[in-house]
Amino acid sequence: MEQLVAQLGAEFLDRIHTVALADPDAMHRFVNDMPPEAEAVQDYLTEVDTRRALFDEFHVICQQHDFTPNAMILAVFMVAPISEIRTQLKVIHNLKQHRFNIVHSILMYAPHAIRTYISRRRSANAPDYPPAAIHSAILNEPGMPIPSSSVTRSGFADQVKDRDGHTCVFSGMPDPEAAHIFPFSTSEKKNFKYLNELLTAFWGSEKAMAWRRHFEAAGITQSAKNGISMNHQIHFWFDNARLALKPLRETPQGIVVQWHWLKRSILKPDVYIRPDNDILHQAGVMDRRWGDTLAHRESGVRIQTGQTFLFPRHEHMPSWELLEMQWDLLRVAALSGAADVMDEYYDFEDPDERGYDEAVAAKQRAILAEYEKAKGKAEVDQDEAEVVDRGKAEVVDRGKAKGVDRKDAGDEDTRE
């Protein structure tokens, strides 16, 4: 007990005691909720210098063809495998103008490819935060009409929730919703053209084909292999690309995934990325941290980036391929700002009309100003530290000099 008091402090332990007396049930849930295990987390963006150099190289090629890459392409360069980006750049380097037009078409429609993937379809009045939870019984009272989509999805939802024991696999809360890994609306429309082209170009034909075999198969996308039981809040953030699950490994026990909170971007998908400023400044990604924590477990303990969860082995456990794809594409959606625009955003016929966005530019200026201010302060601190170091060195040198003088004087006395 003395060791605990030393670690936490007596005042903190007194507060715990007070809370336990006020709400014993809440304290009981908290104490009995062991947090998930956590593993090492990579930076928000990896191999940044290499990716920046590749994007700058691509920028030069685009200028030669009178084309300006947009935020979506920047996001792809920040996420896609570096080996495949290099391969694609070699191909683009050797293209004649008429052949580059094909690549240009793929790049121009990249925002539509990710739009295809984003699961929810929001109107201008859609909320930015999850609405208050509504119990399923209220939504399905006797005599109330059931939407056709609910009928279509009911078999899928039952399969997913039955497999997961009617419990959110992340929060432990009961009465979950069945979330699609690959969006239900997309699998219905089969509007895969732009998505297939983008994946083939920047993830390679082999990986693109492996993913395609899964997301184009109705037997997979409309089965429990395409679903995860999530509570209402987590489902909302998942659909809005505010979290992504990194598949770590498949074991005899099942699939282990790692939770990551994503940041809200300052960009919009069609905004041009200019060569005159650093790309990370333009993207507003000035640090390597992950996004803010937005959800919690049943006990109230927050779910943190880095925590791991097991999808137990089952004949219909979530598809590894679909999990791989959501990990990459949700990060692309978050970085490009695709997660934060409405369908109306894509209604412009001319993409150039969206190449400049004053709201985005204002945020970029603010971030750059803050960065320059912090950089200036760091330089001042460095200069002051150097002055102090020089002062210390001078004191040491003077001390050594005095010591030598005293030694010389002593030697002279000895000689006399």
Image (cartoon, rainbow, N blue to C red):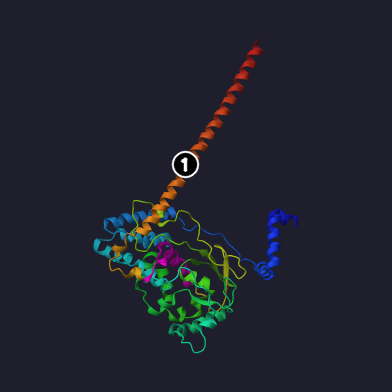
Residue 360, given in percent of the width and then of the height, sits at 37, 58
Residue ID at (27%, 56%): 64
> As rendered, which of 6 and 396 lies closer to the eye?
6
Question: Which secondary structure class fits the magenta region best?
Answer: helix
Q: Which residue is mark 1?
A: 379
* Element type at mark 1: helix
Q: Quadrant of residue 147?
A: bottom left
Placement of the C terminus among the 4 image quadrants: top right
Residue 48, given in percent of the width and then of the height, sits at 44, 54
Viewer can see residue 226 = yes
Neighbourhood count class around disc 1 (C-alpha, 10 Å): few under 14, some 14–19, many 20 upward: few
Q: Quadrant of residue 302?
A: bottom right
- Asked if residue 325 is among those painted magenta in the image, a careful observer would answer yes
Viewer can see residue 52 = no
> Residues in magenta?
322-343
Residue 195's place in the image compared with 394, above or below, is: below
Q: Quadrant of residue 118?
A: bottom left
Amino acid carrying label 1: it is: Glu
Q: Is residue 16 left or right of residue 271?
A: right
> As rendered, which of 101 and 2 lies closer to the eye?
2
Q: Is residue 8 left or right of residue 183?
A: right
Residue 44, given in percent of the width and then of the height, sits at 48, 58
Placement of the N terminus among the 4 image quadrants: bottom right
The extreme bottom residue here reads 143
- Asked if residue 145 is among those painted magenta in the image, a careful observer would answer no
